[in-house]
Image (cartoon, helix red, strand yellow):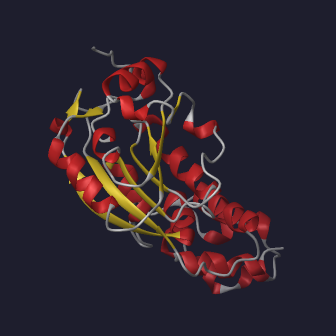
């Protein structure tokens, strides 16, 4: 049975067995009882995931044609696949679960924000993204690509960039390199006034990243606070911890 590719869904199917094996090897460095695969597509990774012993496995796939294909090709997946939009579902398990996937490129940053919503339940994520997004998630302060995604994800997860994946590993080959990253939930999250204040501060600070913090976030602080020399800096030089600490000084 064949399936068609849907550009609108950002579909690039993994075909390189070694990449699949490497992802599964990374996944198995941690122990887990429940696993959610996002966007199994043609099942390149799924066929290995279904072989992991004694794991409660669920996949979520938006494209109903792929769901039919997967159920015919891998009978073991029947009853374990949700034909839904990952960005709109509730957590598929009540307990802790690991997330894995060759994530659709057109929603990759939204996938990371969705994981943040579920962070109490998701200790580990192993994901393939376009390299630019993977690098942004993993980059540290002072880097050109350090931004909202870097700070918000790293407040709650340690991010490790694992390896590059060449376009030739996919069908059709994307126009960009890909990268696989591991997110491991932090044992200690930096103290912040509230997550809402933290998210607001970080997004506001990077909204005008060329400006000094004083100009970028002046709506969030009193004139007195803004006299501090810290506000002469730009957002990209502040660490996650510095952003968290700064929330306690917001008006």
The part of the image, by quadrant, that contains residue 244 is bottom right
Q: In this view, does 52 lie to the left or right of 184?
A: left
Q: Which of 41 and 206 is in front in this view?
A: 41
The part of the image, by quadrant, that contains residue 250 is bottom right
Task: In the rendered view, tell whether residue 71 sits above or below residue 158.
Answer: above
Give the image location of residue 179, x and y in percent: 29, 52
Give the image location of residue 22, x and y in percent: 22, 55
Task: In the rendered view, tell whether residue 78 sits above or below residue 30.
Answer: above
Task: In the rendered view, tell whether residue 155 sits above or below residue 173.
Answer: below
Q: Nearer the viewer, residue 230 or 98?
A: 98
What residue do we see at 37% from left, 26% from top? 70
Task: In the rendered view, tell whether residue 4 sits above or below residue 164.
Answer: above
Give the image location of residue 143, x and y in percent: 38, 67
What residue do we see at 34% from left, 19% from top? 5
What residue do we see at 66% from left, 63% from top? 216
Q: Is residue 114 left or right of residue 76?
A: right
* Count of numbered tags: 0
- Location of the C terminus (image quadrant): bottom right
Q: Nearer the viewer, residue 223 or 141?
A: 141
Give the image location of residue 32, x and y in percent: 44, 63
The part of the image, by quadrant, that contains residue 136 is bottom left
- Location of the N terminus (image quadrant): top left
């Amino acid at each position: 049975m064949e399936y068609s590719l849907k550009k609108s869904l950002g579909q690039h199917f993994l075909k390189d067995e070694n990449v699949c094996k490497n992802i599964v090897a990374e996944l198995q460095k941690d122990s887990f009882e429940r696993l959610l695969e996002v966007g199994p597509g043609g099942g390149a990774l799924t066929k290995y995931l279904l072989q992991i012993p004694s794991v409660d496995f669920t996949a979520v796939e938006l494209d109903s044609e792929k769901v039919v294909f997967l159920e015919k090709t891998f009978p073991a997946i029947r009853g374990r696949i949700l034909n839904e939009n990952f960005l709109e579902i509730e957590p598929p398990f009540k307990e802790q679960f690991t997330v894995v996937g060759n994530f659709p490129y057109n929603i990759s940053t939204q996938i990371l924000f969705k994981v943040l919503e579920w962070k109490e339940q998701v200790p580990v994520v192993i994901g393939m993204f376009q390299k630019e997004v993977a690098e942004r998630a993993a980059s540290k302060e002072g880097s050109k690509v350090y931004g909202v995604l870097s700070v918000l994800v790293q407040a709650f997860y340690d991010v490790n960039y694992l390896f590059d994946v060449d376009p030739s590993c996919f069908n059709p080959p994307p126009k960009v390199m890909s990268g696989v990253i591991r997110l491991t939930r932090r044992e200690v999250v930096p103290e912040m006034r509230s997550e809402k204040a933290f998210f607001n501060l970080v997004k506001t600070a990077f909204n005008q990243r060329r400006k000094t913090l004083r100009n970028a976030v002046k709506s969030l602080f009193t004139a007195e606070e803004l006299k501090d020399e810290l506000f002469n800096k730009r957002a990209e030089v502040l660490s996650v911890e510095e952003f968290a600490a700064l929330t306690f000084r917001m008006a």
